[in-house]
Amino acid sequence: MTTTAPSRLRALARIFRLEYLAASLPGMSITFFLCATEPADLLRRGPLEGLMVVALVIFSCLGMNAIVDREIDGQYATEKSGISHSVNLIGTKRIWRIIATMNVIALAVTAALCIHFRSWIPLLLVLANMFWAYGYSVPPLQFKLRGVLWHAVSLTLAVCWIPFIFSAYTYLGTVPLALAIMILGFGLGQYGFEFANQALDYLEDKSAGLRTPAVRLGITKSLQASLLVPLAGLMVMVLALLVMYIQRSAQSDVDRPVWHVLVGWGLSVLLLLAGYLMPMVRTWQMLQLARATPSTACVRDFPGLCHYAVWQASSVTGVALASAVLFAITNYSWR
């Protein structure tokens, strides 16, 4: 029977994990709110091209991961089995051609950015991003199987730190210290939930001999890390936001009252915490379940608590809204 076009489109959406668009779209607005001084900055050529490159590399990484993991994914009891089926439906050769096309476009746009900025820095950042993103799952590197440290470094650099730095560079041509601290906290906050996400596949990964962070640490320690690492990231972001509020207010031509700055910072912190509340509560519930029942039993109940794409969307949206308040308070007069 011939596969219909909608079926293939749904398969491609699974392969390239388009459910993460709910996190990617607000995530792409963060650097605008942290770097821009007026709405028109969003339509500048450099930032738009930078966002295109970041999206192409990240979704290429997700596609590669789907191909490499198709056999083990087919054994999972979670929705990952659907990803494996989608890869078989589309065919690995066709998927590789799509990924190759995405990378050609990304490199061509990066070359244009190098010419625009008269610098090799955009190319160096993109190549570094490709190395860590593609090396995360593709042999012989496969950083995700080389221990907790390599897993953390690879994934955080690939989907948080380097894309954030690259996008900020397209706005400012540099990365100020306060923004670098914000980027550090953002990466820690987003990566931390990966420990809980890995716990979903604990039984299948352990059975297959895959040394993922959850397998190495065990369920309980992995979930503890999934609480502590995002909490550390939140603390760093709260500090970075305070520094940016103070710096921008001091540099502004507007004589802004101190209470404006404090109220703005407080609102940003509340929005930040609100975005992280749901995933951290769910992680806490998973931890209590793991402490109360054996791993073979509790893991089966984890999918009802851990909806990773939703967690990412919630936390990233919180960061985006907190950054939007910073943009509004420090760039406009509210007298």
Image (tube, rainbow, N blue to C red):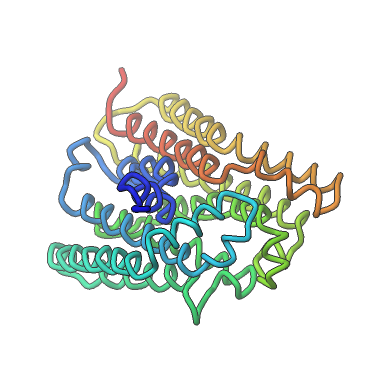
Task: Give whichever of 279, 75 is nearer the camera.
Answer: 75
> Is 223 situated left or right of 140 in this image?
right
| Quadrant occupied by the C terminus | top left
Residue 89 at x, y percent in the picture? 41, 58
Residue that protrudes farthest toward the bottom in the picture: 140
Please identify the residue farthest to the top as the structure is shown: 335
Q: Residue at x 67, y 36 (%)?
A: 281
* Numbered marks: total: 0
In the image, what residue occupies the spot 71% across and 57% down? 222
Say if 12 sits above or below 147 in the image. above
- Residue 28: x and y, percent? 34, 46
Asked if residue 102 lies left or right of residue 288, the reply is left
Q: Nearer the viewer, residue 107 or 225?
A: 107
Q: Residue at x 70, y 59 (%)?
A: 202
Query: In this image, 110 relative to 78: left or right?
Result: left
Which residue is painted at 38% across and 65% down in the image?
91
Give the image quarter of residue 80. Answer: bottom right
Given residues 264 and 305, the one toward you in this image is: 305
The answer to whether residue 286 is left or right of residue 259 is right
**Percent position of residue 320, x then y:** 41, 38
Image coords of residue 53 (percent x, y): 27, 59
Toward the viewer: 17 or 56?
17
